[in-house]
Amino acid sequence: MIQIIKKKIILGLAGTMLLSCTIQDSSAQQKTSGNPLFPGWYADPEVAKFDTAYWIFPTYSDIYEKQVFFDAFSSKDLVHWNKHPRILDSSAIKWANRAMWAPAVIEKDGKYFFFFGANDIQDPSRDYGGIGVAVADQPAGPYKDYLGKPLIDKLYNGAQPIDQFVFHDKDGQYYIYYGGWGHCNVAKLNNDFTGFEPFEDGSYFKEITPEKYVEGPFMFIRGGKYYFMWSEGGWGGPDYSVAYAIADSPMGPFKRIGKILQQDPKIATGAGHHSILHEEKSDKWFIIYHRRPLGETHANHRATCIDEMHFDAKGNILPVKITFSGVKPLPLSSN
């Protein structure tokens, strides 16, 4: 019987930043991804599967004035990750100068569209920014500005234009869900992602805010049902978490069922702003999220992690157990 010895170490992150975490010995470490997935302060991770690789597109977690670029990470098996630095930065987005947040990346017609928030606009009559779009020929970029201006630069229904997620419905329609300040909107993207299509009543932005919603919306389909998820609590504190609702339509209504991701005082705090990966062949589901390591009090000291997500017989999401071990390898076929 092989005894696994756990050790507490200090890992250097991004130069002078330090992250305290618990890992297993090297032989055991190779059997799982470990959490965090990669070194550095990264938050708001968007996961995607493109061709023969898994991708994670996170926010670079630092003070707003330093959030002027995006890195990406790719993996063939969810365990070993390669860094792709600065796939997009403010030199390519002339109107963005700070607070570049929360990527949402989707492939369409052989192009990769990178949606992001920028400038943390508080008052559109005074501030310029919002949700933008960049485009590239491959997931690793380089990305360039697609519109030359924000796609959404105003407040609709009280929702700050941040934390966008693009959802491709089974009928072919692309929706964008977004919003901070406790309000969430949905809009129908037009075919080339240059603007929006109206709803039947002529409106373009509909509020679908569920109970306790704060930010970070996400949508997926399972068993013919629409699972709508969001973050609640304060992003800089220990109570940041993820809750969800289930509906029969991408428009809702979304009645809050409960919280499925939150802190574990023995492992990490502030677990939230997530995305979901479904690997169809194995029918495994994973939640990729950020959390704050124990002992860290700086709001931006957030690291990207992964854990498996499960459902009960009725289709409800079971509470996720956050771990130091992460997940086992799940290789993607090269064919």
Image (cartoon, rainbow, N blue to C red):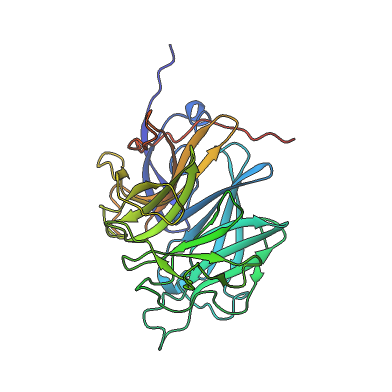
> Who is closer to the viewer here, 132 or 15?
132
Residue at (42, 33) in percent of width and height: 325
State the image coordinates of residue 181 (x, y, percent, origin top left): 32, 68
> Who is closer to the viewer here, 224 or 209?
224
Q: From the viewer's perspective, tell me whether residue 177 is left or right of residue 20.
A: right
Residue at (32, 61) in percent of width and height: 214
Question: Which quarter of the image is occupied by the C terminus?
Answer: top right
Question: Which quarter of the image is occupied by the N terminus?
Answer: top left
| In the depicted structure, whether residue 151 falls above or below residue 101 | below
Q: From the viewer's perspective, tell me whether residue 334 is left or right of residue 104.
A: right
Q: From the viewer's perspective, tell me whether residue 331 is left or right of residue 38.
A: right
Q: Quadrant of residue 320?
A: top left
> Who is closer to the viewer here, 90 or 281?
281
Give the farthest residue toward the front: 201
| In the depicted structure, whether residue 2 falls above or below residue 85 | above
Q: Quadrant of residue 121?
A: bottom left
Number of numbered discs present? Answer: 0
Give the farthest residue toward the bottom: 126
Give the farthest residue toward the top: 1
State the image coordinates of residue 154 (x, y, percent, origin top left): 44, 79
State the image coordinates of residue 201 (x, y, percent, origin top left): 46, 70
State the image coordinates of residue 196 (x, y, percent, origin top left): 56, 71
